[in-house]
Image: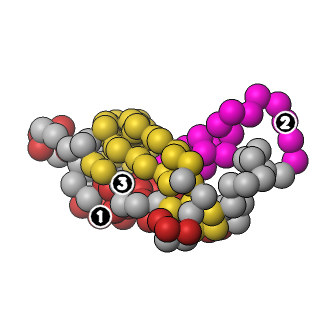
Amino acid sequence: MNPHKRSFVDPASTTARRAALGLIVVLCMTACILASGCLGYRIGSTLPPDIRTVYVPAFANRSGEPELEAATTTAVIRELQRDGTLKITDSDEADVRLEVTLTGYRLQPLRYSEERPTESTEFRLTLEADVILWKQ
């Protein structure tokens, strides 16, 4: 990424940016995984009954954003654990394997601080990823 495009970001906002990134990634990935193949509303899991465990290897990162794969892999695993629909397990024991390749990353400023006009206080984060859920 061009370093001049990031000059508006205050280093103190890095933590907030990463937290926002994690939340957005978790919500998007969980929605994609749990809603795939389901057009109607149902209470409970929409996954077939024989899918109870998942293996999540470290995501591949072709986005150009350093360390993005570590933050997103961790965020998705935490959300899957929190949700409880699928149990995280080793590759040998998993019913399915979730493979993700991060292919794009864009952070756009939406709002700036009144006190410090060069500091962005709100962002729009866009991630692009190739996601494959393999049945083992």
CA separation in Å, label 2 and label 1: 42 Å
**Are the residues flagged by discs 1 and 3 in contact, CB closer than 8 Å?**
no
- Of 45 and 73, nearer the camera is 45
CA separation in Å, label 2 and label 3: 30 Å
> Which x, y percent locates residue 108?
34, 36
Name the residue tied to disc 3.
59
Q: Does the magenta stretch include residue 62?
A: no
- Of 18 and 119, nearer the camera is 18
66 to the left or right of 121: left
Q: Which colour scheme is used?
A: secondary structure
Name the residue tied to disc 1.
12
SS at mark 3?
loop
Q: Does the magenta stretch include residue 31?
A: yes
- Residues shaded magenta: 24-43
SS at mark 2?
loop
> Which x, y percent locates residue 26?
53, 53
Name the residue tied to disc 2.
41
Which of the 4 quarters of the picture holds residue 84? bottom right
For the question of whether residue 11 can be seen, the reply is yes
Q: Any mark on residue 51, and which?
A: none
Q: The disc labelled 2 sits on which kind of residue?
A: Tyr
CA separation in Å, label 1 and label 3: 27 Å
**Secondary structure predominantly adopted by residues drawn in magenta:** helix
User: Mark 2 or mark 3: which comes first in sequence?
Assistant: 2
> Which x, y percent locates residue 17?
38, 55
The outermost residue toward the left is: 3
